[in-house]
Image (cartoon, rainbow, N blue to C red):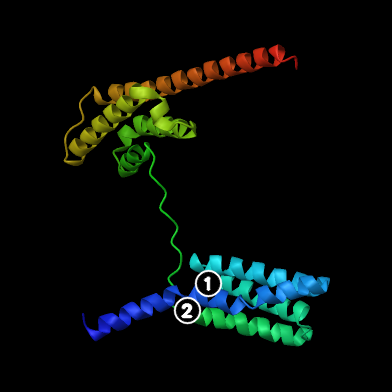
Amino acid sequence: MTEQDLLGRLALRLRRLRGTLLVLLASPLLPALFLALFGGAQRPILGLLLGLGLTVLGVLRLRRGRIRQGAILVGLATGLAAAMATGVAPLGAVVFALMAGFGTILLYADAPPAEEPPAAPDALTPARNRLAALERADPRLRPALLALRELVADLTLRTDGVAGAGHEARRFLNLQLDGLERIESRLRLGAEPPHGLMPLVTEMARGSQALRQRLRHEEKEALEIQVKVLADRLREEGYA
């Protein structure tokens, strides 16, 4: 291992200890809080509690990469503790707060921003991607594509998505998309559309609409059952 690698590892460990450093700097507030509790002075107690609490929140924010928010919280903690617990003049407390906040920003200047975890794709993501790829398909395929988009939109509203619609919906989506993709690829290569193309597209659109109506009917039946069960339960419990 080279000297450069050792220095890099040491720098990485020191960066990981930055939050610990802030906690150590705030640690004298704990004995000060115990002394204030014995003394019974409410203003210093409140100032110390705010200082400790805001410092902890600031460190948590900093560990998540929220540098600006963490620096603001650390600055507020320092200013409030200085003003309320030690009796520093308001202007001095503001100066201490600015120094603490600016120092925290410098301490975490090279920290990478927090990355939001990527959203897990649902079962309808492949169908949406395939429909998006057919966005510029031949205009003659538009009725079937529009009906499919409406079907996918309805499935998206279901809490269980396409999985709750069963094997039929999955098979229907794959069958229609496979067919439309193959037709589009032939048309793009210059194939002359047969006479049966438009009736087929119309039939495909009608099939999507029929499946949408069937799914909505199933949801209606499920709702009616839930209403009946709830009404019976309320009557049994004597609330209706």
Q: Quadrant of the C terminus?
A: top right
Residue 65 visible in the current orientation? no
Instruction: Residue at 57%, 19% (x, y): give it.
Output: 223
Mark earlier in primary sequence (1, 2): 1
Q: Any mark on residue 67, and which?
A: 1
Where is residue 88 drawn, in percent x and y?
A: 76, 85
Residue located 29% across and 32% down the image = 177
| Res 206 visible | yes
Residue 51, how many percent across, how many down? 68, 72
At mark 1, the secondary structure is helix
Question: In the image, residue 130 lies at what x, y percent?
Answer: 31, 40
Choose between 25 and 175: the one closer to the eye.
25
Q: Secondary structure at mark 2?
A: loop
Q: CA distance from mark 1 to mark 2?
A: 8 Å
Tell me which amino acid carries mark 1. Answer: Ile
Choose between 203 and 3: the one closer to the eye.
Answer: 3
In the rendered view, would you say 2 is above or below 42? below
The answer to whether mark 1 and mark 2 are in CB contact below 8 A is: yes
Which kind of residue does numbered mark 2 sit on?
Answer: Ala
Q: Is residue 54 above or below residue 158?
A: below
- Residue 109 circle label: 2
Is residue 220 rendered to the left or right of residue 162?
Answer: right
- The answer to which image quadrant residue 5 occupies is bottom left
Q: Residue at x 62, y 74 (%)?
A: 74
